[in-house]
Amino acid sequence: MTPSRPYLVRALNEWILDNQCTPYVLVDASLAGVQVPQDYVNKGQIVLNISMTAVQNLLIDDQGLSFNARFGGVPMSVYVPTVAILAIYAKENGQGMVFGSEAGAPDPNDPPEPPKPKQTESETKASSGRPSLKVVK
């Protein structure tokens, strides 16, 4: 079967808009083919506002999500392959969906990245905790 993620992203985007909320997508900016403003990437991820007031020419198809927008006043074409979309949710209440691994997603059994330098105890404490989403304006 084909991946369900593009269908779910389209449906959830419509649902969020129908409820007068702002759709945000969380993107893995480190995957191949992702074209986003790198100045706004944080820890390999970026949150994008895909509301009609924030973007132009939004297209969500089976291959990915694309649109034109301004970032810091600079126009840019954005493209996000479907497998790089990690979540879609409403800004106002957090309602939405986080996507897990499915057919077409990057293989979790790929060789791991080379080990990073060992962190000190204080660095480990500072970086531990729950992941959080950040609003990008």
Image (cartoon, grey):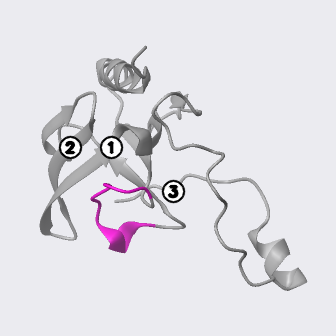
Left or right: 80 as drawn, with respect to 59: right
The residue mark sitting in front, 3 or 1, is 1
Q: Amino acid at mark 2?
A: Ser
Residue designated by label 1: 81
- Bounds of the magenta span? 31-41
Residue 134 got which mark? 3
Q: Amino acid at mark 3?
A: Lys
- Foreground pick, 131 / 64: 64
- Residue 67 sits in quarter: top left
Image vertical order of residue 49 relative to residue 30, above or below: above
Expressed as whole percent of the image width and height from the top left, the position of residue 98 reads 55, 33
Q: Earlier in the sequence, mark 3 or mark 2?
A: 2
| Marks 3/1: CA–CA distance | 21 Å
From the image, state whether disc 3 or disc 2 is nearer to you.
2
Q: Residue furthest right?
A: 121
Amino acid bearing label 1: Pro
Q: Which mark is residue 66?
A: 2
Hey, which quadrant is residue 124 in on the image? bottom right
Q: Name which of mark 3 and mark 1 comes first in the sequence.
A: 1
